[in-house]
């Protein structure tokens, strides 16, 4: 629900600050992170220092592979688990 908050410092130029109930945040590996409109998985990973290590992410229970990172939008409030590539022998 959209709410408005007024700052009555100057009656002639009262700015209106709009914010949503609930923060515009996502959860990445159980850590809160800021979110913006139009954010895709590729944007999210580009903002992480080790974002290049992840071949798959799990967003709200759905697995998303690297080829689909750029085309997959991240919704506000999403819960994301990062799944790194693992190699061994």
Image (cartoon, rainbow, N blue to C red):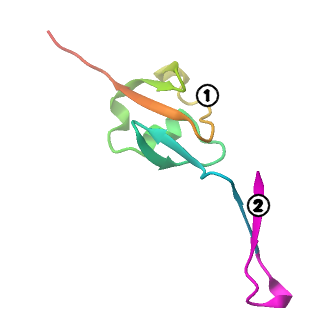
Left or right of 9: which side holds 84?
A: left
Where in the figure is residue 41, as x and y percent of width and height?
52, 34
Residue segment shown in magenta:
1-15
From this viewpoint, which residue is outermost toward the left? 89
Looking at the image, residue 56 lies above or below residue 28: above
| 38 relative position to 42: left or right | right
Relative to 78, residue 31 above or below:
below
Q: Which residue is mark 1?
A: 71
Q: Position of residue 45 (x, y in %)?
A: 44, 38
Dot 1 surroundings within 10 Å: few (below 14), some, or many (20 or more)?
few
Residue 2, image quadrant: bottom right
Q: Quadrant of residue 28?
A: top left
Residue name at image x 44 percent, y 42 percent: 46
Q: Nearer the viewer, residue 31 or 35?
A: 31
In percent of the image, x 17 and y 13: which residue is there?
88
- Tell me the tag on residue 1: none
Image coordinates of residue 21 in percent, x first then y, are: 68, 53
Which of the pair 74/69 is nearer the observer? 74
Q: Nearer the viewer, residue 1 or 84?
A: 1
Separation of marks 2 and 1 at Cα, in angstroms = 31 Å
Picture quadrant of residue 60: top right
Point 56% across, 31% down: residue: 70
Total marks in image:
2
| Residue 75 in magenta stretch | no
Mark 2 Cα-neighbour bin, 10 Å: few <14, some 14–19, many ≥20: few
Q: Where does residue 6 sit, x and y in percent of width and height?
A: 76, 76
Q: Which mark is residue 3?
A: 2
């Amino acid at each position: 629900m959209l709410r408005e908050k007024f700052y009555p410092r100057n009656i002639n130029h009262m700015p209106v600050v709009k914010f949503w109930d609930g923060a515009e945040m996502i959860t990445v590996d159980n850590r809160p992170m800021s979110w913006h409109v139009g954010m895709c998985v590729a944007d999210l990973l580009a903002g992480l220092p080790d974002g290049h290590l992840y071949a798959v992410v799990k967003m709200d229970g759905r697995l998303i592979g690297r080829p689909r990172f750029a085309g997959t939008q991240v919704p506000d409030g999403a819960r994301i688990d990062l799944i790194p590539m693992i190699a061994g022998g």
